[in-house]
Every structure is written in C-alpha cells, then in structure tokens.
C-alpha cells in the first residue's frame, strides 16, 4: 500500500535521532513510560508482553526493566536495528524485536501467546485497518490475557492543534472521515521534524471499541484524561509529569487508555 510505504520511509528518517534521544533518556532514567501508564499497568514482573509499534525500543526496554519479557514489533527496519543496538548497549536481555507491517502480518506464522499485548502513545492513526489490528491482539493473547492501549483521544484528534493554545476549538480533521489525512512533516516528539510524506487515519471511539469486541475481547476500562503524553505549543507539565493546558483542565479529553481481556474460549 502506497501510504504505508511512504509512512515506512518517513519513520525511517527519524530512527537514528530516536535511538540517540532514548539512549540518553534510558541511561539517565530507568523508564521512559509515563507515570500514568506505569500506574495503570501495575505489576508486570514475570509477565510476557507483545509490544506493538515499538519504534526504536525505548518503551519495550522500559517494560523489560519492570521484570517482563517483551517482544517488540515495528514496520521500520532501522527501528528494529536501533532497538537491538539500544538493548545490547543497555545490557537488556529479556527483549527481542521483530520487523513486521501489522497490516500485512501473516498470523499463521506465529503461535506464541502472551500475558499482555501493549501499545501506546501515537499508534492507532498509522493503521488503515483497525479490524486487522484488533484481530492481531486477539490472536496473540493468552486466555484471560490483558490488552493495554494508551493514545490520543479522538475528540482532541478532530481539533485544529495550532489554535488550541489560544483557547480556541475548531474542527480540522472530520471525526467520521475514512480517507487518510496527508502530511508533509513527521516527528517532533523525540527528534527534529523531518520533511517526508506521511498518512494518518482517524478513528471514532465506536470503531476502536467495536473492533476489539469483534475480535473477542471485552473492554474492562476506558479512561479519559485532560492531559497529553507530548507537549503541544503552550502546554505545561502538571505535577504528575503530564502535559496540559490549564484553561482546558476538566473541560475536554486529550488522551485515553483502555484495558480489555480476551474472552475465555
Ligand atoms: C509514535 S510511534 C510509537 C511510539 C511508542 N510510544 C513507542 O516508542 O513505543 C509509532 C510507530 O508505529 C510504527 N508503525 C507505523 N505503521 C506501522 C505498521 N503498519 N506496522 C507496524 N508498525 C507501524 C512506526 O514505525 C512508529 O515506530
């Protein structure tokens, strides 16, 4: 698919910068996971985890440092190369990384089952087929296994991000739009933005929940927050380390997280 090929190239331009950024972060600190994610995940010591869209492995390594054995999957060859390099340099043994396009993944090749499937912070918008994604989660979870997702809230995803700092709300990305949004720039959260064509898709809350339920999961928790996991222009950090606009506090959601379990067969 042309859009996925362009996304692969675009993400590949960021791989080296992300590796360098996260190497410094993981040398200074034990984890790059937000306090919110760590709290919601709870004790994962001894668990097996499949980490979808693992980028250059920083979150994967953070999960491994909490005592889990973690397999990361990502689309981009350089992300996998740098993830392996980062794990080796930080002497992390309980991780491995697989290069796969989730949208083309042949599930018959994989028989392993996991206690937890984990994915977070900027993931759903890169996937053109959410049912395929949910079926992957269902395939890899053990009976009663846990799925954990944290991502930008669809309500916030609709809005013009450039004028939020002025306390203005204007819809820029239609909530029900099915075609991809095309962009010329990528990155910015752990690397300088790079000019490269890339494509993202919008999902409604209903589509997210329905895809998981159709894949045989039941949703235990759907939490919404007035904070975000990255800094938009004008945002400040709250005492929990989350980014927010004080004038939107308690007024609108910026991120959500979800826990679901596979129904016992
Ligand atoms: C915003 S990053 C995820 C960041 C995440 N917090 C992390 O570092 O673990 C999104 C990731 O999705 C990956 N990605 C995009 N499309 C994908 C696909 N079709 N299959 C697998 N990975 C994909 C990109 O390569 C990128 O690493």
Image (cartoon, helix red, strand yellow):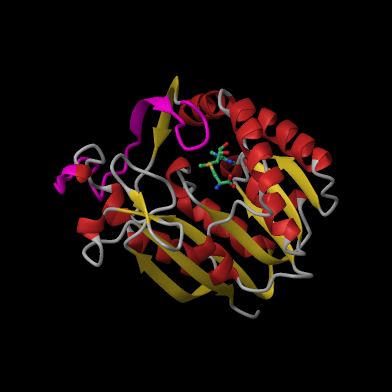
Image x and y of residue 147, in percent:
58, 66
Q: Is residue 229 left or right of residue 65?
A: left
Quarter of the rendering containing residue 227: bottom left
Q: Is residue 114 left or right of residue 94?
A: left
Q: Position of residue 56 (x, y in %)?
A: 65, 38
Between residue 6 and residue 84, name the one nearer to us.
84
- Give the side of residue 18 with respect to residue 3, left or right: right
Q: Where does residue 157 sit, x and y in percent of width and height? A: 30, 48
Residue at figure coordinates x 61%, y 29% from the top left: 15
Residue 6 percent across, percent down from the top left: 50, 24
Does 185 appear in magenta? yes
For image coordinates 15% across by 49% down, the residue present is: 167
Q: Is residue 76 visible?
A: no
Q: Furthest residue to the top?
A: 195
Front-most of residues 87 and 195? 87
State the extent of the magenta-drawn residues as a range: 166-192
Does residue 187 belong to the magenta stretch? yes
Q: Residue at x 40, y 37 (%)?
A: 200
Residue at 56% x, 42% y is 103
Q: Is residue 73 above or below residue 185?
A: below
Q: Nearer the viewer, residue 258 or 249?
A: 249
Find the residue positioned furthest to the bottom. Answer: 264
Within the displayed image, which quadrant is ligand 1 positioned in?
top right
Q: How many marks?
A: 0
Q: Is residue 190 above or below residue 175?
A: above
Q: Is residue 70 above or below residue 164?
A: below
Asked whether residue 167 appears in the rendered view, the answer is yes
Q: What secondary structure predominates along the stretch shown in magenta?
A: loop
Q: Quadrant of the C terminus?
A: bottom right
């Amino acid at each position: 698919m042309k859009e996925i090929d362009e996304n692969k190239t675009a993400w590949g331009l960021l791989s080296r910068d992300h590796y360098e950024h996260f190497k410094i972060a993981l040398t200074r600190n034990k984890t790059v996971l937000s306090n919110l994610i760590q709290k919601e995940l709870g004790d994962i010591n001894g668990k097996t985890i499949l980490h979808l869209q693992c980028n250059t492995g920083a979150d994967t390594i953070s999960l491994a440092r909490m005592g889990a054995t973690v397999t990361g999957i990502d689309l981009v060859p350089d992300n996998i190369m740098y993830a392996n390099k980062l794990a080796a340099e930080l002497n992390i043994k309980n991780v491995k990384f697989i290069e796969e396009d989730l949208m083309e993944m042949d599930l018959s090749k994989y028989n392993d089952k996991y206690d937890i499937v984990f994915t977070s912070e900027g993931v759903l918008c890169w996937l053109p087929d959410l049912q395929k994604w949910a079926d992957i989660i269902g395939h890899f979870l053990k009976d009663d296994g846990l799925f954990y997702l944290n991502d930008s809230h669809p309500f916030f995803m609709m809005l013009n991000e450039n004028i939020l700092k002025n306390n203005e709300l204007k819809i820029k990305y239609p909530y029900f739009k099915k075609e991809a949004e095309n962009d010329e720039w990528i990155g910015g959260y752990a690397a300088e933005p790079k000019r490269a064509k890339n494509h993202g898709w919008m999902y409604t809350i209903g589509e997210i929940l329905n895809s998981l339920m159709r894949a045989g999961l039941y949703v235990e928790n759907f939490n919404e927050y007035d904070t975000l996991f990255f800094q938009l222009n004008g945002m400040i950090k709250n005492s929990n380390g989350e980014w927010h606009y004080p004038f939107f506090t308690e007024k609108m959601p910026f991120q959500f997280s979800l826990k679901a379990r596979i129904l016992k067969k």
